[in-house]
Amino acid sequence: MSPLPSGDTIEQAVRLSGRAPSLHNSQPWHWVFDGATLHLFSVRERILPATDASGRQLLISCGLALGHLRAALAAAGWQIRVAYFPNPTRHDHLAAVTFEPSRIVTDADLDRAAAIEIRYTDRLPFTAPDGWRDFEPVLPVIVDPLDAVVTVLPPEARSELAHASRLTAAVRRYDSGYQAELQWWAGHSLAAEGIPPTARLSAEERERVEVNRVLPAAAGEPRRTEIDDDRSVVVVVSSGDSLVELVRCGEALSTILLECTVAGYATCPLTHVTELPRSRAIIRGLTGRDEQPQVLVRIGSVPTSEQRQPRTPRLPLAQILEVTAPATSTAE
């Protein structure tokens, strides 16, 4: 007999996968469970054509959801096998996931799954990450080099990073299509998608974070006023630009974000400086790698006494999971 996860386990894993970050919280994923295999599809209607014309970030976002699913199932005692793009006639069919029982569930598995509920994108300024010297060597170990490569940028790269960020903002300021998308996804409240005001920066807060996407400013009293300037460490996640490489890059990014959360760090993924050729070239020059920079991540510490920020809403399970047959055991 070859057992399968229960229907409840599948639902819980998919729900947790939906906590993955995505471009402007667009959540461009859809899962279909046929009773034996869990299929991941991209939702083309959720692509942002002015911001992500090639669909590169859509694929990375879906890879993040796949990585979160893997972490959730590992904690429940299941390993997964992934067939990428199993249907050559359907580029929206990103993955077919099958299951096998794990030999053991480690504390690391449990910690990573628990981090899914805690992690959120924090755009406010950070202090330098506590204990970074001990954590930095962990990064190359937790990421499969076939999925992505990670470059920790030195402090002296900060001025070039800020230049790339300003350059992107200056070009985008006159891009009416981009600005319209930004206002739609981040300029007003949506029930379960988009970027809510609590997750955006005020004009004053924005001045203290040099490397950040310029979103519509939020109102309210300035937060973290004890931090004059952002002192985060910035890492670059790079990979190839093929369809499979982008999905796998998203899986690697999922691992990085969850492990940083387990370590007690705050994180903020950044993609604006990889969206335009000129700023992307600046970042690639800083890494010195042949692979293309896909996502940057700010990593840092925040005051322990700070109130927990509200989680950004997500689409309900019924909108991201379709079950066409119940889970059953199959005989070989």
Image (cartoon, rainbow, N blue to C red):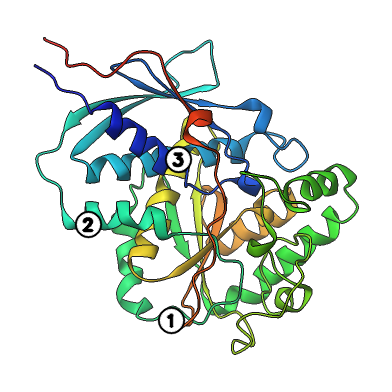
Mark 1 or 2: the one toward you: 1
Looking at the image, is 250 positioned above or below residue 87?
below
Numbered circles on residues, count? 3
The image quadrant of residue 268 is bottom right
Please name whichever residue, 281 or 48, is drawn nearer the observer in this view of the structure: 48
Residue found at x 63% / y 41%: 26
User: Going by the image, does 278 lie left or right of 85?
Assistant: right
Q: Position of residue 314 (x, y in %)?
A: 55, 44
Q: Residues within 10 Å of mark 1 (few under 14, many from 20)?
A: few
Please name whichever residue, 120 or 254, is drawn nearer the observer in this view of the structure: 120
Residue 317 visible in this rendered orientation of the protein: yes
Residue found at x 26% / y 19%: 327
Mark 2, residue position: 108
Q: Position of residue 15 (x, y in %)?
A: 41, 39
Looking at the image, is 304 positioned above or below residue 69?
below
Q: Residues within 10 Å of mark 3 (few under 14, many from 20)?
A: many
Q: CA distance from mark 3 to mark 1?
A: 28 Å
Mark 1, residue position: 304
Q: Position of residue 213 (x, y in %)?
A: 70, 60
Please name whichever residue, 212 or 185, is drawn nearer the observer in this view of the structure: 185
Q: Residues within 10 Å of mark 2 (few under 14, many from 20)?
A: some
User: Going by the image, does 216 lie left or right of 223?
Assistant: right
Q: Earlier in the sequence, mark 3 or mark 1?
A: 3
Name the element at disc 2: helix
Q: Earlier in the sequence, mark 2 or mark 3?
A: 3
Residue found at x 39% / y 81%: 130
Mark 3, residue position: 65
Name the element at disc 1: loop
Q: CA distance from mark 2 to mark 3?
A: 19 Å
